[in-house]
Image: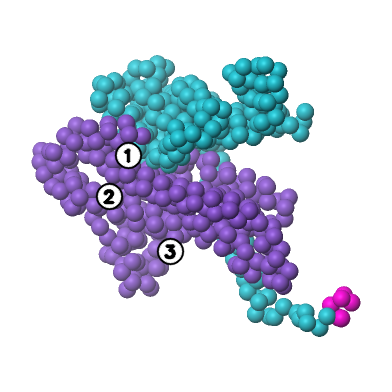
Chain colours: A cyan, B purple
Amino acid sequence: MTAIQHAPAIRRISTGRRVKDKIVQGLVYLSFAIAVVPLLSVLWLVLSNGFARLNMEFLTHSMRNIGARDAGGGAYHAIIGTLEQVLLSSVISIPVGLLTAIYLVEYGRGGRLSRAISFFVDVMTGIPSVVSGLFILAFWILALGMPFSGFAGALALSILMMPTVVRSAEEMLLLVPNDLREASYALGVPKWRTIVKVVLPTAFTGIVTGIMLAIARVAGETAPLLLTVFFTDSINTDPFDGPQMGLPLYVFDQSRRPTDVAIDRAWAGALTLILIVMLLNLVARLIGWWRSPARR
Amino acid sequence: MAAIAVFLIVEAVPALQANQGSFLGTLTWTPNNTEPSFGIAALAFGTLLSSLLALVMAVPVAVGVALFISHYAPRRLAGVLGYVIDLLAAVPSVIYGLWGVIFLVPLVQGPYEFIHEYLGFIPLFGGDSVGGHSIMTASIILAIMILPIIAAISREVFLQVPRMHEEAALALGATRWEVIKTAVLPFGRPGVISASMLGLGRAMGETIAVALIFPATFGISFQILAPEGNSIAANIANGFAEAGPIGRGALIASGLVLFIITLLVNTAARLIVARRKEFSGAAA
């Protein structure tokens, strides 16, 4: 206080500037409120409407022989479809994505090829999901004459998943300290063994988290499935033959029907989908927390 | 990448050859008729208009949210809030679509009628009638969907502002707003711009949420409250099930156009980010 009294050059902040400061603060708070309101509204509606319809019948029955205006029916076929498609697309994109990331970090090291790959991965991240569906439709179904199937959907999903996996795995591998690699080389360990035994275990947690988030992202994709998996109301457990269903597709299909029972089914499907996605997110965070360096 | 373009072109060519109208100029989409005729103009217009509107709505709010998390919220709370915003991004788009159709469409009917009644003399809000299934509603949903992306990237950029710049501004007696205006925003501008362009690319490619909203009419109209509108992606989703061979080819052709547009937007965004990296590296 005394310092201020002895320094007359420092004056109080003028009213105009203070008011402006407060106005901006208010605007910032307001914009945050605006952003949160839709989230709360979405979550509330999905939870309240979804739990009203979510029961064992919904989880264990398909929509076969359920007429447009009938109540009842469920999403069993869609849940099976989603799990199979997501599993298949993970099987395709995780190895490819991981190997690409290892190449970029361990072997490429800023060469021309790795810079080109890096650029394409960046651009691929921005491919609209509907375009990846169209590509599989044009390539796999129209050009090669394959049927609509869960596998075609998995191909489309893996196009969307791969860049995410590469990006997150690359970032995690870059975090591994070079000292660890050099210590391993100093012991005479060949490069591939260093990568398998030292680099990958060190980055393991982060990579798994990234993969989980990538899976959660594609699990909610609708548009590529619409073009490659098509619709069905029956249970089809074979992802390589015939149309399947997927949960996002199920929600889309039901919400376009004008009856209340269909809308209820759509909400319950949306809730199931959110629960699956949130579960994956939670698992990712748990793994991150469980294996985090702070706990070792 | 190239394979995507090649196969889309190969499958689109037969339909384009069968097209009786002009692909760039025709304002109808009847590829399944005996005399197929379709054009991209109305769809591309709907895509661009709804995405740009969404961007106009989302960017100020997103910047506000990013500032709130990086500079206003208590440190402890900031991490949690950042997580909440990321959560918004994790909600599947079909759920936003469902929410939009069931909740938002009836909700906006009243306000739209109010605006139409009193501001109808402005062409933007004019038209014969207004309704919830309009470009405006689709834009609102798109804005909600792209907000988390823009906010997350902007937040990262704002957190990277060199501490020195902010402290220098504070030492000169700046209020918090003046610190933001003089130190944070100039540093973060390229980041915010590229984040917005990434959001724009996302909005243009978004399919399901807008497919549920748009009534699938054709035509070019700036009357954003009128119950009409369509976009490339929504048209693919809505038209695919009924499409014949030519119809599929036409949809693939429209997807190719969407692919090229988003590619341009995203590449531009990446280039801006890359330039900024060099710049900040030199300054550090």
Instruction: Tell me the residue that label 2 is attached to.
Output: B43
Q: Secondary structure at mark 2?
A: helix
Labels 1 and 2: the sequence-earlier one = 2
Query: Which of the two discs, 2 and 3, sits closer to the camera?
Result: 2
Is A104 or B116 nearer to us in this picture? Answer: A104
Q: Residue A33's quadrant in the figure?
A: bottom right
Pick the quarter of the image with the N terminus of chain B.
Answer: top left
Q: Is residue B266 left or right of residue A36?
A: left
User: Which residue does the image show at 65% across and 80% down from the upper left?
Assistant: A16
Q: Secondary structure at mark 3?
A: helix
Q: Is residue B272 above or below residue B125?
A: above
Q: How far across and down, in percent of the image, does residue B7 sit? A: 27, 31
Q: Is residue B256 left or right of residue A91?
A: left
User: Which residue does the image show at 27% across and 64% down from the upper left?
Assistant: B128
Amino acid type assigned to the residue bearing label 3 in the image: Pro
Tell me, yes or no, whether dots 2 and 3 are on the same chain.
yes
Assess disc 1: are there few (<14), some (14-19) or many (≥20) residues with their C-alpha within 10 Å of its C-alpha: many
Q: Chain of mark 2?
A: B
Instruction: Tell me the residue that label 3 is attached to.
Output: B111
Q: Residue furthest bottom?
A: A8
Q: Residue A121's quadrant in the figure?
A: top left
User: Which residue does the image show at 13% across and 38% down from the upper left?
Assistant: B17
Region of the chain picked out in magenta, as a range: A1-6
Q: Which mark is residue B237?
A: 1
Assess disc 3: are there few (<14), some (14-19) or many (≥20) residues with their C-alpha within 10 Å of its C-alpha: few
- Residue B23 in view in this figure: yes
Query: Which of the two discs, 1 and 2, sits closer to the camera?
Result: 2
Query: Which of the two discs, 1 and 3, sits closer to the camera?
Result: 1
Q: Is residue B271 above or below residue B4?
A: below
Q: How far across and down, in percent of the image, does residue B227 sit? A: 31, 56
- Residue A278 in view in this figure: no
